[in-house]
Amino acid sequence: MKTRFQIACTLLAFAVAAGAACAESAGSSVSTNYSSSELKSMMRNAHSQHDYQALAAYFRDRQQTFEQKAQSEKTEWDRRSQNITGPAAKYPRPVDSSKNRYEYFSYEAQQMSQQAAHFEQLTATASR
């Protein structure tokens, strides 16, 4: 009798843990990262409004990620630009590295914004 109770409690614990893991993975499916080949395939095979919405959401998510990285790099750039003497004055200067990273992240955010706008426009067209 005691063994049955222990087994039942163990099974119940596993069921609760599995349910929590499923709920967590379902909630994080919004920020999915696709490989390059998966993304190209999705873009090539997208024909419905749902497909376009998924791609637009993906690109908006990527845009936000790059904007956050650009903002943190801008802060780092400002911090590094206050000390450009001594070892920090040698090329390539740390401030130049931060500036380049900031410009890269800003450019990528702009590209993701353009892609998202394109697929949002296709979504509006497909709904007609």
Image (tube, rainbow, N blue to C red):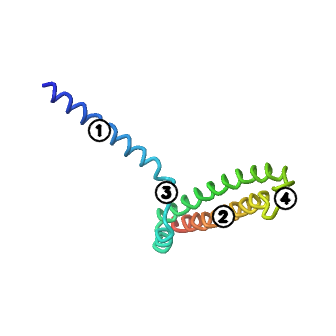
Between the C-alphas of marks 4 and 1, the distance is 58 Å
- Can you name the residue that lies furthest to the left here? 1
Of the residues tagged 4 and 1, which is closer to the observer?
4
The vertical placement of 15 against 53, above or below, is above
Q: Please state the total of marks drawn on the protein image.
A: 4
- In the image, farthest residue toward the bottom: 44
Q: Secondary structure at mark 3?
A: loop
Rounded to the nearest angstrom, the CA distance separating label 3 from label 1 is: 26 Å
The alpha-carbon separation of the residues under discs 3 and 2 comes to 18 Å
Could you tell me which secondary element the residue under label 4 belongs to? helix
Quadrant in the picture for residue 121: bottom right
Residue wearing tag 4: 89
Give left or right: position of 81 versus 14: right
- Which amino acid lies under the numbered mark 3 shown in the image of this protein? Thr
Q: Secondary structure at mark 2?
A: helix
Disc number placed over residue 69 in the picture, else none? none
* Number of the front mark, 4 or 3: 4
Of mark 2 and mark 4, the one earlier in the sequence is 4
Q: Quadrant of the N terminus?
A: top left
Q: Which residue is mark 1?
A: 14
* Camera-nearest residue between 78 and 82: 82
Q: List the residue tagged with mark 3.
A: 32
